[in-house]
Amino acid sequence: MTSTTVMPGGESPMADPGMTERLPGVIFRLHRARDGRLHFPYLAGSGLRLIGASVEQLARDARPALEHLGEEEYPRLMTAIERSVSDMTPIATKFRLPLKGRGVRWIALRAQPSAEQDGTLWHGMMIDITEQVAEEARLRRLSDTDDLTGCANRRRLMHRLDEEISRSNRHATPLSLMILDIDHFKQVNDGWGHLQGDRVLRALAALCRDSLREEDLVARLGGEEFALLLPLTPESRGQHLAERLVERIAAHDFGLPGRTVTVSIGIAEHRIGEDRDSLLNRADRRLYAAKHAGRNRVVTSP
């Protein structure tokens, strides 16, 4: 005769208790009474250890589980529940579950509602997706990062530039963009080899990052060309920063005996209503003006 397990609330699923305890997550029934009270008539799975409350408690009241959610996650989950009740649509969401002394876990929740005489009943499951979220974040970083220098790549720069231009247009806040190019970089590659050229690029990227604030962005546009995005920064302040950066790079030992590495920089400040391409073009024109004026300098106009 097949054994059954009677769960709190009178449920009698035909299941092997050992199997449900080994499930990599939680399967559940969640009931919401018409007055808004929530409880779990059924819970099973290895993920119960993350909840921090007993099955018996949660069969009477779901609040001990919900109280573990953070200030941002709780209202978001409750909104998803209310929307599901109103529209009879499935719940499909993910949330962070803080664990005391053990960091934070990411949980994916999927549940299908059904209308009952005394409220709404969901059949669903919760799965720990922390490793998946971490891997997705790692892949995003890789897709947004220049392999050689570790700074942002062109894709990430364009995305961030769009965000900052939108903010500047909405709030009339200053925004400056520098474009920086290493002078005569081909001579470095030809004279010392591409491996040494790569070391120069990495060292220069590090010098740029060290010179900027946390909210600024250093991106490699390609080759020996970099962009430095400076939110909340007028052109005059950006010029001062660029001039210090030019001096710092010229004084740095890049490991090239008898050779000084210098850069040319063009700067443009965003004009309200200006699009991304126009801002990039103005900064680029000023970079080439710096090149034509003798290199190892900063140009802010015309």
Image: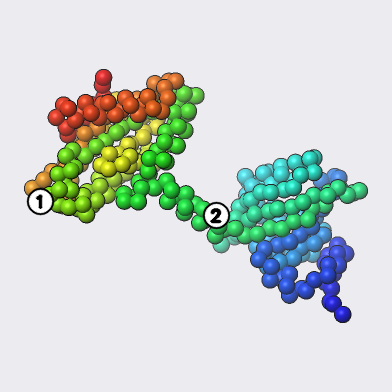
Q: Is residue 152 above or below residue 14?
A: above
- Give percent across and percent down for residue 293: 16, 26
Q: Whole-percent x and y of residue 44?
A: 74, 65
Identify the residue at image location x=85%, y=77%.
2
Three-letter residue code for mark 2: Val
Q: Residue at x 91, y 48 (%)?
A: 117
> Residue 257 has which mark?
1
Residue occupying the far right of the picture = 117
Q: Return the residue at label 2.
A: 133
Badge 2 crowding class, 10 Å Cα cut-off, few under 14, some 14 to 19, many 20 or more, is: some
Q: Amino acid at mark 1?
A: Pro
Which mark is first along the chain, 2 or 1? 2
Judge left or right: residue 256 versus residue 23: left
Q: Residue at point 68% right, 71% down?
A: 22
Neighbor class of circle 1 (other Cα within 10 Å; few <14, some 14-19, many 20+) is few
Residue 144 percent across, percent down from the top left: 42, 46
Q: Residue 62, relative to residue 233: is it above or below?
A: below
Label 2: which secondary element: helix
In the picture provided, is 254 more to the left or to the right than 274? left
Confirm whether residue 165 shows in the render.
yes
Residue 268 appears in the rendering: no
